Image: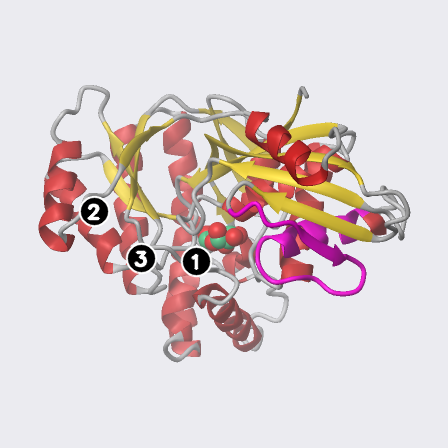
Amino acid sequence: MPRPAIDLFHEAFGAAPRAAASAPGRVNLIGEHTDYNGGPVLPIAIAQRTTAVIGPGADGDEGVLEAVSTRDKQVVRVHWQEALPTGWAAYVGGVLRELWSLEVIPPNGSARVALSSEVPIGAGLSSSAALTVAVTKALAPNLKPRQIAGVAFRAEHDHVGVRCGVMDQTISALGMRDHALLFECASLEATQIPFDARLLLVDTGKRHDLSTGGLNQRRAECEEAVKRLKVELPELQWLASWPAEWLPRLKRALREPLRSRAVHVVGETARTRFAAQLFQEKKLRQFGKLLYESHESCRRLYECSSPELDTVVAAAKRAGALGARLTGAGWGGAAIVLVNKTDKKTVPAIQRAFERAYGRSAPISEVHASAGAHTERL
Ligand code: GLA
């Protein structure tokens, strides 16, 4: 809904906006921490979206970005070529820099941006990609979805400095209603797979901040693992390309914690490709088993789970859910739970277990595969 952002634009800048666009957050069904290792991911775009409403800067305000969000309604003013502020406005500045390098906007271009979002921040639902993709689509509506994903990715990765992969921006730009996207992050091959399953989202309420968190550290560990494994296999480019049948050799070549990180990535890569195939064949029970395995691998080997996420997944399993796992980077955030359409037991079972463990409730909602970025009418 563009209305809150349109109203905010008027309120903050005393002028009418020129264009608007929105982009969704995402959940990842399986394929965690594989994207920056050149492996596959299987995300869907969710119904919650971020809306960006834009207009030109004030007369004479060259090279200035003014940005405001419904969250605090404070206008951030920045010379986007020179320095980026901290916080969410840095992501908007990063998009301007990228659009400048594509010559979509001039070097002294100015812009005003108002944002509103339904995607909770730090919940592992990719609020940052929803933001960068929405702003890119609003400022450059004629770019192709893959170009938009590229701009949004580089804004976050190169300018804000989060060492993320390409999954979040790609699904936010390319997502299709009622479809999941199998995306191979090395070849960039994209396959839309019909999504017709009952999927629950459980928000643990524990927030993470990826710009300071474990993601950068994990990525460095994966790079170190590739460096060492190149001694064994000089042509190795991506950790995910290590042959799964050579796991014993990988284990001999690496020490902890690199060994565990690499075993996760190689295992998760094979698991995700198999899972996508099962999902396409509608073999949800087998698919669900792989979700549990993926969670276990994230927890034990990649060490990116949290006690709250483990509580949710264990309760789902006990209640007989088809599958469950953390989604997104982990270290808090949300879990997904795959259930039969007639299942009535899983939701109350998770609620009971969570309340018993943490003395508070964890909101549970149903996830629908939604459309990627599009322009909005003003
Ligand atoms: C974050 C990153 C993604 C991906 C996931 C983990 O969401 O932004 O690129 O690496 O973590 O799968």
Looking at mark 3, is its residue's CB closer than 8 Å to ligand 1?
no
Which badge, 3 or 2, is on the more N-terminal residue? 3
Nearest the viewer among 139 and 242 is: 139
Mark 3 or 2, which is nearer the eye?
2
Quadrant of the snapshot with the C terminus: top right
Mark pair 1, 3: CA separation: 11 Å
Q: Which mark is residue 266?
A: 1
Which badge, 1 or 3, is on the more N-terminal residue? 1
Residue shown at 68% from the left, 29% from the top: 20
Q: Which mark is residue 203?
A: none
Q: Residues within 10 Å of mark 3 (few under 14, many from 20)?
A: many
The answer to whether the residues at label 3 and label 2 have Cβ atoms under 8 Å apart is: no
Quadrant of the snapshot with the N terminus: top right
Residue 58: image quadrant is top right
Residue shown at 32% from the left, 65% from the top: 301
Q: Position of residue 327 (x, y in %)?
A: 37, 46
Residue shown at 46% from the left, 21% from the top: 178
Q: Is residue 47 visible?
A: yes
Nearest the viewer among 16 and 307 is: 16
239 in relation to 358, above or below: below
Q: Amino acid at mark 2?
A: Val
Q: Secondary structure at mark 3?
A: helix
Q: Which mark is residue 312?
A: 2
Judged left or right of residue 213, residue 189 is right
Q: Amino acid at mark 3?
A: Ser
The answer to whether the residues at label 2 and label 1 have Cβ atoms under 8 Å apart is: no
Q: Position of residue 300 (x, y in %)?
A: 28, 63
Mark 2 or 1, which is nearer the eye?
2
Q: In this figure, which colouring scheme has been used for the structure? A: secondary structure
Magenta segment range? 72-99
Residue identifier under label 3: 297
